[in-house]
Amino acid sequence: MQFPSKKPKAVTDLKAELYSQPLQFYGQPPLENISLSEFESFAVDRLKLLKTVENLGVSYVKLSDDYKKKLDNEIKTQNFPHGAGEQTEKRRKDHISHFILRLAYCQTEDLRRWFIQQEVDLFKYRFKELECGEKLKFLHKNNLQYNTISAEEKDNLREKLATSSYTASGVKVEEQDFYKVPFQDALDLVRTRKVYLEEGYVYIPHNEIVTIVLNDFRTRLSKALALTARSLPAVHSDERLQPLLTHLSHSYLGQDYSVQKNVGKISLEQIDSLAGKSFPLCMRQLHQTLRDQHHLRHGGRMQYGLFLKGIGLSLEQALQFWRMEFIRGKVDADKFDKAYAYSIRHMFGKEGKRADYTPYSCMKVILSNPPSQGDYHGCPFRHSDPELLKQKLQSYKVSPSGVSQILELVKGMHYQLACQKYFELTHNVEDTAFSLSHPNQYFTESQKVLGGGKDVKRETDTLQRPQENSAARGLTREPAGDESQHLAEITKNLETDFQDA
């Protein structure tokens, strides 16, 4: 697959031009050939980095010492460029991985919005870390011509500039340049009253020029994603890349919950108790609906059934559980065996292609098969009306301040972080030591907290494969239907070119 360029250049020329600078606007697409295995590995590493950016942005004050320390460590861990010096290969990885995720995350408005926010935060951190000379070189290279005010104008405004928040911190007016820009280009600074505003213009000291650079970066990236979305039909026509890109946008980067080492470790009598104390809100909602209505539609049965499978319910237990509940409703035993038993055996890999279906991750729940009228699957933080979500949280005894914190995260579209906050509030822990990304992970961590860090007898054993297996794979795969296959099978021995339209 190729992304044509109007003026192709030799790869060596491209590297010399793009990778000589520590930062870029990603305006020029990659032109070289890479294998699909490298394609996947670059994308997964950048996705891990962006997930860290999101988590840190909510857990810490952005650009605080702790924020910068943890983000810098993640950048080094994922082998992306950091600091000064020759880092051509790392910059190449940064460049290519950005364009891969641009393909994966241009597909919907929610994906684009998330991708833009994390890329902007990452760009801001990197720009702020540049030396003053490197910042000027970057501005010049990207034709960012911001007009500095004259010495005469600066002298006339000296007192007003000196009392603005940034200059009041010890920076002398005469020691730096000030840029005069339309106020709409620096709304964040205007909103927080951190710059001097006069007649529709703001006066920004050089050390805060990052604000309008970020606006430019955000605008360019937003337009680029819209253009990339138009080229998706051509990209999706390549059956090798389409599953890979779809998987990236729904990817789960944590432990694998498909291996049932804990089969039979919970009993049917324990489910009601576990639902009230250790189920995430999505599964608690499905369990309550099933108990009240004695029925769930297909989407709910798949989401909840695979979750129960992941926490240790055996096939025999699952058949007994669903049959007993459905018979209490309008389904008799004969109809259940004919219409529903097959699908339960199917999710356990005993029918059809005998695929061992994996419990849904948070990303799959959030982005796949949104619930319609009469459905109860999906993510309550993503798919519920805010007022209904508020009522549900209040009914589960979440404090008013806790409800406000969760709704604020939901408003910012941080759905997994909202669920993690729900975990903290319902388990009376101030700061979780994990990044929540899977309903079964929620259950496991809940049982650890309730059991004092130890495994709870019968209720749970470890749900995780050995660390080395996950580390070797790097990314856990989820079947997205009968036609899905392990990503490694899709990419094995395949190579491709790629280039942006």
Image (spheres, rainbow, N blue to C red):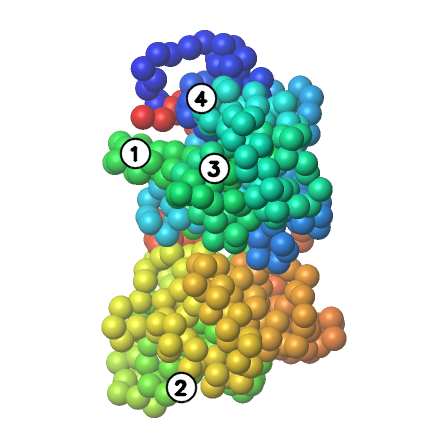
Neighbourhood count class around disc 4 (C-alpha, 10 Å): few under 14, some 14–19, many 20 upward: few
The residue indicated by pointer 2 is 291
Residues at marks 4 and 2, CA–CA distance in whole angstroms: 63 Å
User: What residue is shown at x 44% (from left), y 59% (from top)?
Assistant: 413
The residue indicated by pointer 1 is 227
Mark 1 or 3: the one toward you:
3
Please, what is the three-letter code of the amino acid marked with disc 1? Leu
Q: Are marks 4 and 1 in contact (CB under 8 Å)?
A: no
Counting residues from the start of the chain, the first of labels 4 and 3 encountered is 4
The residue indicated by pointer 4 is 143
Q: Is residue 69 left or right of residue 299?
A: right
Please, what is the three-letter code of the amino acid marked with disc 2? Arg
Mark 4 or 1: the one toward you:
4
Asked if residue 428 is positioned above or below residue 232 in the image, the reply reads below
The quarter of the image holding the N terminus is top left
Q: Secondary structure at mark 2?
A: helix
Please, what is the three-letter code of the amino acid marked with disc 4? Asn
The quarter of the image holding the C terminus is top left
Please, what is the three-letter code of the amino acid marked with disc 3? Ile
Residue 361 appears at what percent x and percent y? 48, 59
Q: Secondary structure at mark 4?
A: loop
Q: Secondary structure at mark 3?
A: helix
Residue 297 appears at what percent x and percent y? 30, 73
Neighbourhood count class around disc 2 (C-alpha, 10 Å): few under 14, some 14–19, many 20 upward: some
Residue 276 in view, yes or no: no
Q: Which mark is residue 212?
A: 3
